[in-house]
Image (tube, grey):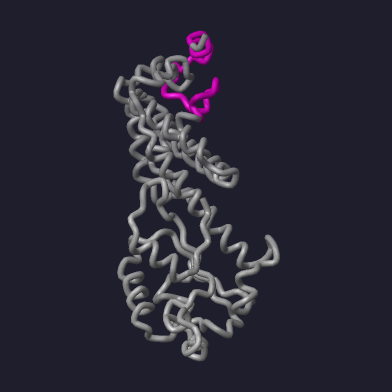
C-alpha cells in the first residue's frame, strides 16, 4: 500500500512507531521537505501554530532530524528531491544531512509545482517510480533468497543436466550441489525483470566460456570429476571479477546454476566427459 504523508510526519512515524511486518515502511520519498526548518516559516510563525515548528533550529525539527541521521543505517530506502526554484525550503534544508549523490535529485520546480508533477516525463514522477522500482526489486530479491532448496524435492531425475552427470559418473555430492544451484538459478529467473534477464543471459555465456576453457585445458585426460570440481571452484573465484553481475542477489551459487541450465539441453555445449553420449542421454529422459 502506498501512503502519502507530510515529510516530517512521515519521519516521525518511521522513527517512533512500532511497525508490524505487513505494515513495514519500505520506502521514503522526501519532496522539498524542510528537514532543518524553513526561513519562510518565521514569517508565518506568529499566526500559524504549525509554522512555529518549522522555523530553523526549532527543538522538535532539530531533534527529529538528528535522530533520523543517527539511525540512517536502519531507515527504509530513501530518495530526496530538491526543488531548484523553491521559495520556502532551500537546498540545505531539503537534505537532512550528508546524503549519497545517487539518492538526491534536483528538479526544475518551485515549492508548489514540485508536488504536482505534470506526467510520466516529469522528473519528480521519474524519481518516485525509480524508488518504487528499487524497493520492488529489493523485495523480489529477498523473496528469492528466502526460497530454500529442499534436497528431497524436486529430484530432477529426468533433467538432462542430471543425466549427463550420472553418465559421466560425477559423484553424489557434486550432483546434489548441481541440483541446488540449478534450483537457485531457476528462482532468480522467475523473479527477474526483462532487463535483468538480458544481463543474466550475457552472464550465462561468460560462465559457459569459463567452462569451455577449463574443459579444453583437460583435453588429454578429461578427468570428469577434476573438470567438474575446477569449473565450480573457478566460478566461485571469478564471482566478483570476470563473472561480476549487475543483477542484485546473483551469487556464485546462482552462476553455477546458470551453467547447469546451459547443460540442461540435448547438446554437447556442456558435458563432463567424452563418453557423454547424447543418444543415451535422450533415451534416459524418456
Q: Using the image as rendered, state which of residue 134 and residue 234 is in the foreground.
A: 134
The residue depicted at 42 percent of the width and 40 percent of the height is 143
Percent of width and height locating residue 3: 51, 57
Q: Is residue 270 magenta?
A: yes
Q: Position of residue 109 (x, y in %)?
A: 63, 76
Along the viewing direction, whichever of 204 and 1 lies nearer the viewer: 1
Name the side, left or right, on which 125 lies relative to 93: right
Q: Residue at x 38, y 21 (%)?
A: 153
Examine the rendering and report whether any part of residue 102 can be seen: no
Q: Is residue 216 left or right of residue 133?
A: left
State whether residue 259 appears in this view: yes
Q: Main secondary structure of the magenta part?
A: loop
Tell me the quarter of the picture where residue 150 sits. top left
For image coordinates 37% across by 74% down, the residue present is 65
Vertical comparison of 223 with 21: above or below: above
Give coordinates of residue 272: x percent, y percent. 42, 24
Looking at the rendering, the stretch of residues picked out in magenta corresponds to 262-284
Amino acid at each position: 500500500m502506498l501512503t502519502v504523508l507530510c515529510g516530517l510526519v512521515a519521519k516521525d512515524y518511521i522513527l517512533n512507531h512500532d511497525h508490524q511486518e505487513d505494515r513495514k515502511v519500505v520506502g521514503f520519498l522526501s519532496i522539498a521537505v524542510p528537514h532543518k526548518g524553513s526561513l519562510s516559516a518565521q514569517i508565518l510563525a506568529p499566526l500559524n501554530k504549525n509554522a512555529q515548528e518549522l522555523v530553523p533550529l526549532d527543538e522538535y525539527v532539530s531533534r527529529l532530524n538528528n535522530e533520523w541521521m543517527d539511525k540512517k543505517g536502519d531507515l527504509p530506502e530513501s530518495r530526496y528531491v530538491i526543488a531548484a526554484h523553491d521559495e520556502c525550503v532551500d537546498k540545505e534544508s531539503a537534505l537532512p544531512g550528508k546524503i549519497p549523490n545517487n539518492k538526491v535529485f534536483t528538479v526544475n520546480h518551485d515549492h508548489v509545482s514540485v508536488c504536482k508533477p505534470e506526467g510520466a516525463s516529469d522528473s519528480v514522477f521519474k524519481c518516485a517510480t525509480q524508488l518504487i522500482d528499487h524497493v520492488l526489486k529489493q523485495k523480489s530479491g529477498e523473496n528469492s533468497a528466502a526460497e530454500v532448496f529442499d534436497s528431497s524435492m524436486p529430484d530432477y531425475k529426468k533433467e538432462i543436466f542430471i543425466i549427463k552427470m550420472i553418465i559421466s559418473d560425477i559423484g553424489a555430492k557434486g550432483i546434489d550441489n548441481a541440483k541446488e544451484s540449478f534450483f537457485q538459478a531457476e528462482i532468480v529467473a522467475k523473479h527477474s525483470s526483462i532487463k535483468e534477464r538480458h544481463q543474466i543471459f550475457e552472464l550465462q555465456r561468460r560462465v559457459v566460456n569459463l567452462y569451455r576453457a577449463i574443459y579444453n585445458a583437460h583435453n588429454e585426460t578429461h578427468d570428469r570429476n577434476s573438470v567438474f570440481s575446477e569449473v565450480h571452484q573457478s566460478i566461485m573465484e571469478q564471482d566478483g571479477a570476470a563473472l561480476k553481475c549487475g543483477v542484485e542477489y546473483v551469487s556464485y551459487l546462482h552462476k553455477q546454476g546458470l551453467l547447469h541450465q546451459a547443460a540442461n539441453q540435448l547438446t554437447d555445449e556442456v558435458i563432463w566427459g567424452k563418453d557423454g553420449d547424447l543418444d543415451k542421454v535422450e533415451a534416459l529422459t524418456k
